Image: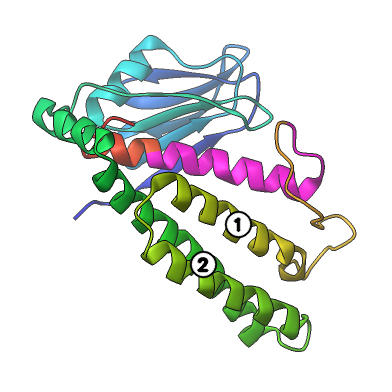
Amino acid sequence: MKQLLNTLFVTSEDAYLSLENDNVVVQRDKTALAKIPLRSLEQILSFSYKGASPALMGQCAQTGTGLSFYTPRGRYLCSILGENNRNVLLRRSQYRFADDTDSSARFARSFVIGKIFNSRWVLERTKRDHNLRVNVKRLSSQSQALSGYLKQVSGCNDVDAIRGLEGLAAKDYFYVFDDLILRSKDDFFFEQRSRRPPLDRMNALLSFSYSLLTGDCLAALQGVGLDP
């Protein structure tokens, strides 16, 4: 079973990461701000312009510690991937699956079913826990629509059609997303999804969270030997 360790977030844009005796050293203006044992970390997320030393990047690649770089505004840049767990036969099988439309559709269908199911469950849970504070009728209507998409995706074998249903389901989910925000509505509200750049605080939070999720997914794929 995989042991879940800590994640180090480096949010100072002028911080520099280096390695010293198997410790991650966070520096600013040549002054050490912190030292953290590398073995206690599962991943490092750096939002600094200055980056990290080659020694630290090499050690992270060797130990399997995820190291991802973002801009100070949260845009994902890249991750350090080592040579560990690189299985040529596994990669070849992965590419064969990617080239086979039936196999690709099977994987895509599973992903999208999980996404729509979780979206619907968020709406149902909000209805259950906050029924006096939300528009239950509107949430129920969109939840029912998502249920319909689940049935359509389950019987779909075309990747493009699955993507289309995913987009329609996301549109219906975001239609009531503002109803799910129950605090600080003056500062955090949702009108529509906007990206590159996000046009309000809520979209900025969503984009930031998606960037972090991208790093997690890359690390997970690398950890089992798949091509991210």
Quadrant assignment for the C terminus: top left
Can residue 75 be seen by looking at this rendering? yes
178 relative to 114 in the view: left or right: right
Residue 44 location in percent, x, y? 44, 33
Quadrant assignment for the N terminus: bottom left
Q: Tell me the element at label 2.
A: helix
Q: Tell me the element at label 1.
A: helix
Residue 40 location in percent, x, y? 33, 41
Residue 227 location in percent, x, y? 28, 30
- Tell me the distance, in whole angstroms, between the alpha carbons under discs 2 and 1: 8 Å
- The amino acid on which the numbered mark 1 sits, given as a three-letter code, is Leu
| Residues shaded magenta | 197-217
Q: Residue at image x 58%, y 79%?
A: 125
Question: Which of marks 1 and 2 precedes in the sequence?
Answer: 2
Q: Quadrant of residue 39?
A: top left
Q: Main secondary structure of the magenta part?
A: helix
Dot 2 surroundings within 10 Å: few (below 14), some, or many (20 or more)? many
* Residue 206 within the magenta-colored segment of the rendering: yes
Can residue 4 be seen by looking at this rendering? no
Q: Nearer the viewer, residue 17 or 204?
A: 204
Q: Residue at image x 47%, y 59%?
A: 115
Q: Which residue is mark 1?
A: 168
Q: Do the residues bearing badges 2 and 1 touch, measured as CB atoms within 8 Å?
A: yes
Q: Nearer the viewer, residue 3 or 125?
A: 125
Q: Which residue is mark 2?
A: 149
Q: Nearer the viewer, residue 214 or 39?
A: 214
